[in-house]
Image: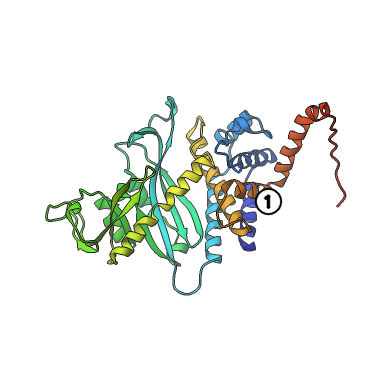
Amino acid sequence: METILAHAHTLMYTILALMPSRYQRDNLEAMLGLFLAADGKPLPHYSKSKSESALSRFLNTYKWPTRKLIRHVRQQAIEQVKSHCPLGRKAFLQVIIDLTTLEKCGQFKAFQNLITVYNGKRGLHIVVLYLVVGQWRIPWNFRVWRGKGTASPSQLALRMVRHLPKDLTKRFRVKILADTAFGTKDFINNIRKLKYHAVIGIGCNRKLVNGYPVKLLHHRGQQVRLVGLDFPVTLSWYYFKRDNGKFVKRYVISTQPLKASTISWWGKRRWKIEGWFKTAKYRFGLDRFGQGTLLGIYRWLVLSITAYLLAYWTYLSSCLPDSLDWGQAAFLALSTFLPHLVLSLLLLDIERLRPLALSHGIDITISRCKI
């Protein structure tokens, strides 16, 4: 597990070295510190080490290599997975695809083509490609859906699948897992052409070639032919429990002949991405961006995901309890990678509270000890 932390340290040093000046490195550290507070509010307004305007310029104006940062994060993620690859039979690389809405209010005049309404939710809609292999959880890629008349969510997802790294697709058995929104005939046919196997949700009204909807079928595990598909698929279903306690019947198809119970098991695995959506939003502020430029939004999303990975890798390398506490993991990552930032914030708090301590007869003195 020390190797995980070593990779994470390497990543941290590398992305800091990408910054063109010490001033920019300080800004990056301040932003990562906000995200690693894991309170869901990493807004520049709350920074104690840098001004709000300085962090705003860092995100929206200053030139620093965002794409290089992404490449280094991805490369370290691949190295992590490869170095902890289980021996023996190839493990599964679960490629989970879903769409989430980063809900927004207000006008956002500069982004009228980006802030749209989808399924009754207004905001920025992003298609996310999320990788799961063994204990590893990696938000690998995302694309913004720009509304009607542009590339559909399934087309955006297909583009991301086509660009999966060969280092992973050759080492693992790829299994595509997607929700009903991606169960289009073009998406399924193209996944087949890429020689990947998939388990994808479909609507209950999806038509068979004989004209009947799948909801009229009574036996799981049947091979069926759906309208628009060039090959037969195996159908199954399972019952999913919603937050209100009600169960909903979910239909799933497999492009590979499998047992009904196996297809249902894979279909349920897709919901792992929902847990990441909640963590990314409510812990790492993925949806809290307020930037005035598209570049600023893009950088915000990238830094939020980077902070999540640093916290998760720190958790994997530590002796923390099996039940993952994201607040605890994020603070451990912050104190591991940016200890000087933690200490400087502590000293600022002590200085701010010194008058209160003196009023109660407490004199706080800080001195540097000899090591």
Q: Is residue 325 visible?
A: yes
Q: Which residue in the rendered view is the most extreme toward the right?
A: 370
Say above or below: 260 vs 26.
Answer: below
Q: Which secondary structure lies at badge 1?
A: helix
Q: Quadrant of residue 347?
A: top right
Residue closest to the eye, 293 or 263: 263
Q: Quadrant of residue 210?
A: bottom left
**What residue lies at 39% left-to-right and 44% top-to-bottom?**
243
Residue closest to the eye, 229 or 34: 34
Q: Which residue in the rendered view is the most extreme toward the bottom?
A: 88
**Amino acid type of disc 1?**
Thr
**What residue lies at 57% left-to-right and 39% top-to-bottom?**
39
Q: Which residue in the rendered view is the most extreme toward the front?
A: 245
**What residue lies at 55% left-to-right and 38% top-to-bottom?**
40
Quadrant of image for the N terminus: bottom right
Q: Which residue in the rendered view is the most extreme toward the left?
A: 210
The residue identified by callout 1 is 336
In-image side of 366 versus 164 (left or right): right
Say above or below: 94 vs 67.
Answer: below
In-image side of 210 versus 32 (left or right): left
Mark 1 crowd level (few <14, some 14–19, many ≥20, 10 Å Cα)? some
The x and y percentages for residue 223 are 21, 63
Q: Quadrant of residue 314?
A: bottom right
The x and y percentages for residue 203 are 25, 49
The x and y percentages for residue 217 are 18, 57
Residue closest to the eye, 343 or 116: 343
Q: Is residue 187 visible?
A: no
Q: How many marks?
A: 1
